[in-house]
Amino acid sequence: MQLIAAMLAIGACGKEESSPASAVAAPSATVAAQASAAAKPAVGALPAPPASPALGGRTGELVNPDESTMVFLYHELAGIPAPLPQWVENDNRVTFAPGPEKAARREQVLAEIQGGLAVVRNIGFIRLTLNDQLSDYDAAYGEFTLRALAPSSTVAFRALQQEITLRFGNGRTAQIWALPAAKAQVVQDSFGYGRAVVLDLLLKVTAVQPATGGGAIVADVLEYEIRTQQGNKLLGRVQPAP
């Protein structure tokens, strides 16, 4: 397990989900760069919402966090002490280091983990990019649906021998993109073939659910942009009903 390059990724990282959606991969960044991203939204990103009173006024945000970062966030939100000695000893740089070098490697890995834990202390919002397939248009209800945001959908983050899942608390409404028939036809005509889309989500963390070997972070979808995967054409911006 390596933590140096993947400690706090600002770009999107690959993830497995129970739905057909998958997170978009992007290069990693340093701890300092992630701390900066938590304080400032990405260029062109949707504006940050006000503080979340449900989580004690947390105002910080993560941008497409990697697996390790989400494990850190889970422990911070759940109030579960991080098993630092276990994480340090299981790091490959410590496990496979020659005996005389182990002590120095332990200090290095511990410092990196502590830095990652420090960054997530004020996090209440997450910006996440997912791939999905837009449904056929339902003329009877006047809407498309997005399976990646369904109540049953999750995004999995696996690191440090734990699995953290991200669930959408308002998935029932967030998955619906309501449009009149005329506008829906314009959307459908925007695709060359298929209906592959990219979703840029703004999420507010609302709860944490501890479990053995990991747990779940629950977040509400505040808003999202829908773009075509081919050509990156903006199709719409959606603010789910409360």
Image (cartoon, rainbow, N blue to C red):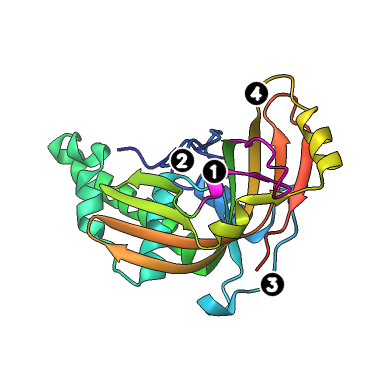
Q: Which mark is residue 50?
A: 3
Residue shown at 81%/34% (left/top)? 185
Q: Is residue 227 visible in this depiction of the protein?
A: yes
Identify residue type, mark 3.
Answer: Pro
Q: Which mark is residue 122?
A: none
Res 174 → quadrant:
bottom right
Q: Is residue 203 visible in this depiction of the protein?
A: no
Mark toward the start of the polypeptide (2 vs 1)? 2
The front one of 224 and 35 is: 224
Judged from the image, the secondary structure of the residue bearing numbered disc 1 is: helix
Judged from the image, the secondary structure of the residue bearing numbered disc 4 is: loop
Judged from the image, the secondary structure of the residue bearing numbered disc 3 is: loop
Q: Which mark is residue 19?
A: 2
Q: Give the class, few, some or many, for how many residues have Cα within 10 Å of label 2's Cα (few <14, many ≥20).
A: some
Residue 201 rendering spot, x and y as whole percentages: 63, 50
**Range of residues picked out in magenta:** 133-150
Kindly identify which residue carries mark 4.
194
Task: Tell whether label 4 touches label 1 (CB within 8 Å).
Answer: no
Give the distance between the C-alpha atoms of the residues marked 2 and 1, in whole angstroms: 6 Å
Task: Tell whether label 1 touches label 2 (CB within 8 Å).
Answer: yes
The front one of 212 and 174 is: 174
Q: Is residue 80 magenta?
A: no
Judged from the image, the secondary structure of the residue bearing numbered disc 2 is: loop
Residue shown at 25%/42% (left/top)? 91
Q: Give the class, few, some or many, for how many residues have Cα within 10 Å of label 1's Cα (few <14, many ≥20).
A: many
Kindly identify which residue carries mark 1.
147
